[in-house]
Image (cartoon, rainbow, N blue to C red):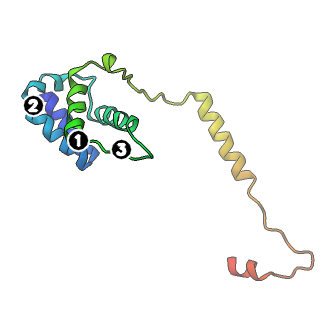
Amino acid sequence: MEGLERLENEVLEMNNCNISAIFDYLKTREDLYEKFNNEEKSIHQMYEFIYEKARKQKVDNVAMISDRVVYLWAVTYFLKSNDELGLKEKRVMPPTPAEVIKENEKRTKKEETKPEEKKLEDNQITLFQEVSK
């Protein structure tokens, strides 16, 4: 049951009624309970898989997919391995020290090059300068 609990927690974290409806259906499928224990499977990745399948079927930026088909895609996601589905795990790499230094240098340059207020030659204040104070 630990796989089911892990996925339930992920559904709660995502706070999406569509994902909740899909997962509620999946919980009725007792044949999938063993598949829920697979650590490489996640609700977020299942959602991405379904999203991509629906995106491929859109016409003029609209995709009408029946609930039955969406549930079938969700079941397929859990029944097949990620390799069979062509899914690759997305890993976020932390920035390298060189990238951090470069980013910090950009920030300091922006701070140094802030535009200074231009003074008029005749020391007269414009209406816009008075409003900005």
Residue closest to the eye, 23 or 125: 23
Report the residue at 23% width, 26% height from top. Answer: 76
**Relative to 123, does residue 81 appear above or below in the rendering?**
above
Q: Residues within 10 Å of mark 2 (few under 14, many from 20)?
A: few
Whichever of labels 3 and 2 marks the residue nearer the N terminus, that label is 2
Whichever of labels 1 and 2 marks the residue nearer the N terminus, that label is 1
Q: Amino acid at mark 1?
A: Val
Regarding mark 2 in the picture, which secondary structure is present there? loop
Quarter of the picture containing the N terminus is: top left
Horizontally, residue 11 falls left or right of residue 58, namely left
Q: Quickly name the residue at label 1.
A: 11
Report the residue at 42% width, 43% height from top. Answer: 59
Q: Position of residue 107 (x, y in %)?
A: 65, 46
**Relative to 64, does residue 35 appear above or below in the rendering?**
above
Q: Amino acid at mark 3?
A: Ala
User: Please, which residue is most extreme toward the front here?
Assistant: 59
Mark 1–mark 2 Cα distance, whole angstroms, equals 17 Å
Whichever of labels 1 and 3 marks the residue nearer the N terminus, that label is 1
Q: Amino acid at mark 2?
A: Arg
Horizontally, residue 117 falls left or right of residue 33, namely right
Labels 1, 2: front one:
2
Q: Position of residue 14 (x, y in %)?
A: 28, 44
**Relative to 78, does residue 115 appear above or below in the rendering?**
below
| Residue 30: mark | none
Horizontally, residue 122 falls left or right of residue 20, namely right
Mark 1–mark 3 Cα distance, whole angstroms, equals 23 Å
Q: Position of residue 52 (x, y in %)?
A: 37, 34
Q: Quickly name the residue at label 3.
A: 63
Report the residue at 16% width, 28% height from top. Answer: 3
Residue closest to the eye, 98 or 32: 32
| Residue 29: mark | 2
